[in-house]
Image (spheres, rainbow, N blue to C red):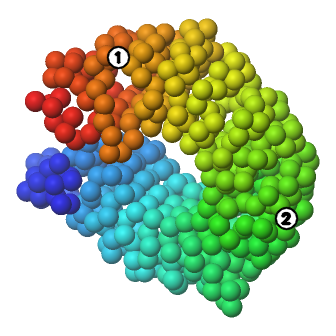
Amino acid sequence: MSQIRRKRSASDRKPLGRFLSRTSDRTGIPEDAESENKGRSPGVSASVESESDAGWGRLRVFLQKLGKKADSRSLSVAHCDLTATDLLELGSLLRFFPQLEEMDVSWNELIGGSLMTLTSHLQHVSGIRTLKLCSCRLNADDVAALAEAVGSAPLLEVLDLSWNSAVGGGALQSLLGKLPPSLRELHLVACQLTAVDAAALGGSAALLPGLRLLDVSCNPRLAQEAGAGGFTELAAALSHAAALSALRLQGCGLDAACLHALGTSLRCLPSVRELDLSCNRGLAGGLSRLTCHLPHLTHLESLDLHLCCLSQADLEALVQVLPSLTALTELDVSSNKDAGGAVHLLVASLPPARVRRLPLSSCRLNEESFRALALAAPYLRSVDVSWCKVVGGRLSLLLDALQPSVVLELRLSGCNLTADDLQHLADACRRGRLSALRVLDLSYNGPVGDAGWSALFAAGGLGSLEEADVSLRPLTSAPCSAWLPALIGALPRMPALTRLAMRRWTAGEQEGKQLQHGVKNRKIRLEWDPEVSDDLNR
């Protein structure tokens, strides 16, 4: 499967090393400059310069094989299905990259266990500032190799090891103590971190005075194993990370006790601008342990509490503290069912002219709360009321409140929209209220009808739209022949469109060919069901 995913066979890749060697032989450039140039004096400088040029040429050939372009300061070979042999070749070429500042080797799952072949050459790129190794199946030996080599990168500012499950469980500890003081961002998403790892992270916090972003999301064991006290130690140590501006703890198994420990440290971190506590269901009923500390975050701009099972008491505690968060521009309480009944209180407590995002999808909005949302709508850059059935038949209340050229995202998935709703949406487009819109999600709204879709696409006014989704629900299907001509005719008036999702809609062969022609010329990614795509490609 790996060989298939490369879009090239193994035989296509193997001659690469031999080709590079033959190139060196033909040009007279040796593989080892030191041994070849030993004893020379008059032409040493010219020989080194010639070798550098040849090395850069080898690097360009290597990257061209991967469909990449060479850049003296940035190297990205992400999603290239690199093998251990490729990594060895890449490592040997780093010496021709002395100005390299960014390197991304992410999403190459075949290089796990062989990272040393790359890290052993890091001394040649001592000015590197960003190193990304996401989803490479790194093991403990790889992390140890990185720990030994990271000292060769004294200017490193961003390190991303996310989506490597073997990083947690002890392997990380060998690396943390060797991270350079220059580090500004540390990403460890979904690394299977444990309470022991949390304690180790806490111990290294004082050694990273410049740390501005810490992301340990999707590590559900981080706050478990209460006896180990790992998260408590991490939370306490964060009080020393005075420069911290973003803390992401999504899905870390946090509970009310964790909030108390975290809140105590947040009092010492007025520079925090982003706090993500989402997907921690254990917070239910205990949010007040955190909210009493939030007023100290005078620069807090983004607070994410989606999918935290917030209770009515939690929401009341949040409402009480919101007036003191004068810098807040984003509040996410979506996927909290009780939030629907508190929207009017939330909107009244927020600084209306500053709030740019207030997603309320899956919040059981009622008519009163939907009307309250309309009060904040004029200033919102993103509107998301997906899976709120009350929107159906009442969309005009929201659209009439929008200011022209303000909203960038409009998400109305699964809202039971009607044909009249889409007529109102078409009117808003014609009046220029959605002229800046980039994302429009109308998926899972079957009752709209052909007239509604036709009116929307015939209206125009979506010149900035980049993504559109009109997909039907799973296990359903319907013909789109009645409104497809309106969509095809609208494509030239949507020059920014890059993605069009129409899953489970069906079309005739001729209509399908017309649509395929329209999106192919524009390089728009069309998302249909496999059987529909097969029909289009015939």
- Residue 411 horizontal side relative to residue 19, left or right: right
In the image, 14 versus 140, the foreground residue is 140
Q: Which residue is mark 2?
A: 288
Residue 124: x %, y % from top left: 43, 60
Q: Identify whether 97 is placed above or below 236.
A: above
The disc labelled 1 sits on which kind of residue?
A: Trp
Residue at disc 2, secondary structure: helix
Residue 498: x %, y % from top left: 39, 28
Q: Which residue is mark 1?
A: 483
In the image, 472 versus 293, the foreground residue is 472
Upstream in the sequence, badge 2 or badge 1?
2
- Exactly how many numbered labels are in the figure? 2
- Residue 341 horizontal side relative to residue 349, left or right: left
The quarter holding residue 353 reads top right
Residue at (52, 54) in percent of width and height: 130
Q: Identify whether 151 is placed above or below 203.
A: above
Q: Is residue 197 visible?
A: no
Q: Identify whether 514 is placed above or below 301.
A: above
Residue 159: x %, y % from top left: 54, 61
Residue at (31, 13) in percent of width and height: 485
Q: Identify whether 18 is placed above or below 7.
A: below
Residue at (84, 68) in percent of width and height: 289
Q: Is residue 189 visible?
A: yes
- Residue 282 horizontal side relative to residue 324, left or right: left
Residue at (11, 58) in percent of width and height: 10
Q: Quadrant of the N terminus?
A: bottom left
Residue 202: x %, y % from top left: 70, 76
Q: Which mark is residue 169?
A: none
